[in-house]
Image: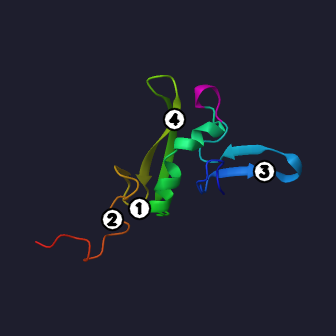
Amino acid sequence: MKTPYGFDCPYFYGDYYRGKKQEECRLIGNQTGSQRWEVRLCENCPVPAIRRANACTFMVLTPVIKKSFLGKRKVTVTAYCQKSESSVKTPEIGCGICHPLDELFTVKK
């Protein structure tokens, strides 16, 4: 579903039927305190870009809401691959085991 900022995110849900305005992030969930989700976090969230670049079904994203230097809150994401059982350094590319690159994109020695 599209976020209010125009990105297509698989975890964003908005119910606007008959004047309702219920919005939620199903990745972050209903956490309390400083980890509470609000729609402003969608503006700079990296999850839609990660999912556009890599749609691997084995990759599990774990979001954390952190405060920046000036007190603004932002979403940071860590990724884990269930198939290779390792942490993914660059979620946009993946672990490299699930979906290896073609010969066209690799450097020949």
- Give the residue at mark 3: 15
Q: CA distance from mark 4 to mark 2?
A: 30 Å
Tag 2, which secondary structure? loop
Residue at the image point whose x is 89% and y is 51% from the top: 18
Residue type marked 2: Ile
The residue closer to the viewer here, 8 or 11, is: 8
Mark 2 / mark 3, whichever is N-terminal: 3
Of labels 4 and 2, the one closer to you:
4
- Give the residue at mark 4: 74
- Give the residue at mark 1: 83
Residue type marked 1: Lys
Q: Is residue 87 magenta?
A: no
Residue at the image point whose x is 49% and y is 61% from the top: 52
Tag 3, which secondary structure? strand
- Main secondary structure along the magenta-highlighted residues: helix
Mark 2 / mark 1, whichever is N-terminal: 1
Mark 1 / mark 3, whichever is N-terminal: 3
Mark 4 / mark 2, whichever is N-terminal: 4
Residue at the image point whose x is 36% and y is 59% from the top: 93
Q: CA distance from mark 3 to mark 4?
A: 24 Å
